[in-house]
Amino acid sequence: MIPHAPILAIFLPLFAAFLMPIIGILSRKRGVNHAREWVAIAAVLAELVIVGSMLSEVLSGQIILYKLGNWDPPWGIALVIDGLGLFAALIVSGISALIVGYSFVSMEKDTGLDQYYTLLMLMLAGMMGVVLTGDVFNLYVFFEIMSIAAYALVAFRRNWQSIEAGLKYLIIGSLGTSFIILGVAFLYGLAGSLNIAHLAQNLPFLPATTLILPLGLFVIGLGIKIAMVPLHMWMPDAYQAAPPPVAALFSGATATVGLYAMLRVVYMLFGAFGIGAMLAGLGLVTMVLGALMALVQRDLKRLLAYSSISQIGYVLAGVGLGTTLGIQGGLFHLLNNAIYKTMLFMIAGTVVYRVGTSNMDKLGGLWKNMPVTGALFGVGALAISGVPPLNGFASKWTIYMAGVEAGQGGHWPGYAITVIALITSALTLAYFLKAFSNIFLGQRPGHLADVKESPRSMMFPIMLLGVLCVVFGILPQIGIDLVRPAQEALMNSGGYISAGLGGM
Amino acid sequence: MAGMSPIVRTTARLLFPFTFLFGAYVVIHGHLTPGGGFPGGVIIAASFVMLVLAYGIERAQERVGFTRAEVLESIGGLTIAILGLFGLLAGVAFLQNVFPLGEFGRLFSGGNLPLLYLAVGVKVTAGILLIFYAMLFGFGGEE
């Protein structure tokens, strides 16, 4: 581990964010091109190295405790990194690195890129803070940093649609974070601590009836953030109106962070309440409704947004089962969702970049113009629909098996999860085939005849993700091995408690 | 925005040094008295905003332009970050104090706390000015 890696992982993007306006001004004065882009790329790559350096410790079963200001927990703020936290941190930093590389060309026609990269770096700092912290109030603060940067990024292009979506996201998102802070306040009042490990230690001794209110507040607040049905209404607008790289970042990294917070706070703190069944139920509703809504969309980005909602449902259903297999499947699906959903949003971005619209009624026959993009879209679409031998199949299969296993163990709802997940998978295939045929097959409108293939630098991150889709599909064992530390961390809250309190 | 009547201008001009001084006092004594970087920075920014309202945007921008405010804001943020790094490099933990603590109750005491307040004050002043300028530009339709 690089010394002080946990704090550096949060500090570095924050520093880069503050540096960005100065670099923008200096580079304009000196006439240097693309200075901001290169600084941002350097920052995310360094971030990836820092996060990666913690891997060996965590994989060997250790839980890293980093005391801020050297104050002992539970009094001081601590960063606690276990398998689950590092798993989310790796997804976030990896996706962010690809997004910054993709933004290079994708955003070159926009003005105000100082602000764009500042906000992107702030958002990365917020996301890293959420996944690495061991303090529930700190988690709220970083969630706010992430969300406020996200509101501004949605409204970045400042047209009518994006400002409306940004405002909607701002109002609903602030409502969500208010619920979270209220929940934190109640927990502090009840247990007298904000340290997650300390809370997890003390909550079982409190009367259950007093914990229902904070639990409800957390589920609603975090549910808004991850766009769980019926709290999802902001999400399609925001994803459609945001610039494509931002939408890709939202679907890959922000959704992962939201789900991480849901698992860490709700599942680990309130695990004793049979919260799993509730999460699984909400997951099923989310899954089905997201897929049904995606089926009728005419806009590619909107379709992808509803599909994101549907995929979040799979993760919740898998984790909600609470068995080893279920949690492994759910977390594996979280990883896979980050991979192919980022990829699909990036492809939507290249189509918008070349054609200027993501309205599927106005597209068609683009296979002749952009065969590589089309093929990669096909890979992503098949992966998300769970067609073997791609990665979506591996994680969905694990979730189906977990449902059957739970059913055989006497819990009949397990079978229901498997059946509903299977049907939703078929629906997913249906709407992605529709999207594929509308964009790449069929009649090509005359004015699209001289559309060119996507630019190489935008293609590279997409290809990388496409390769990951195939690798995790053919060799699912790699994915399961990656996920296992996170699953063990989620099921072993005792280890987290003793490590988070410094071995007390 | 053209500015207001001579009465308002004169009052604003007379009040400006006192408001500014009070803001600076609140920032610098942040570690000793109630207040600190944030409220002090807001007071300093308010003194500038008062001038902007009285004299019009052009005169105020000669003093503190948009770019200068942007640079100041970044410098404020970077200072906080670098002070944090000092703690990491010279001490044990991020933001840990590495400066002499001094005598309790004196102006030059409290280690890195007054420096942090100063950085916060600069950042908040510049930030609030930026927000104000941005709103003026938004209404004026510039940029």
Image (cartoon, rainbow, N blue to C red):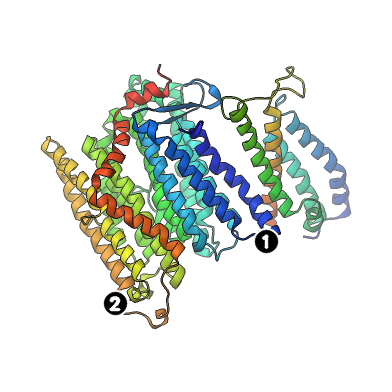
Looking at the figure, which quarter contains the N terminus of chain A?
top left
Front-lying residue, A9 or B60:
A9
Q: Earlier in the sequence, mark 1 or mark 2?
A: 1
**SS at circle 1:** loop
Where residue A492 appears, as percent x and y from the top left, is 30, 27
Q: Please indicate, yes or no, whether residue A21 appears anywhere in the rendered image.
A: yes
Q: Amino acid at mark 2?
A: Gly
Q: Is residue A133 above or below residue A38?
A: above
Query: For the residues carrying marks 1 and 2, which lies nearer the camera in this image?
Result: 1
Where residue B42 appears, as percent x and y from the top left, is 71, 40
Q: Residue at x 49, y 47 (%)?
A: A45
Do the residues at discs 1 and 2 belong to one chain? yes
Front-lying residue, A427 or B77:
B77
**Mark 1–mark 2 CB contact (< 8 Å):** no
Residue that mark 2 sits on:
A442
- Label disc, if present, on residue A31 of the rendered structure: 1
Q: Is residue B57 above or below residue A7?
A: below
Give the Cα distance between marks 1 and 2. Answer: 46 Å
Q: Residue at x 25, y 54 (%)?
A: A390
- Label disc, if present, on residue B102 of the rendered structure: none
Q: Amino acid at mark 1?
A: Gly
Looking at the figure, which quarter contains the C terminus of chain A?
top left
Q: Residue at x 23, y 38 (%)?
A: A321
Where residue A260 appears, as percent x and y from the top left, is 38, 39
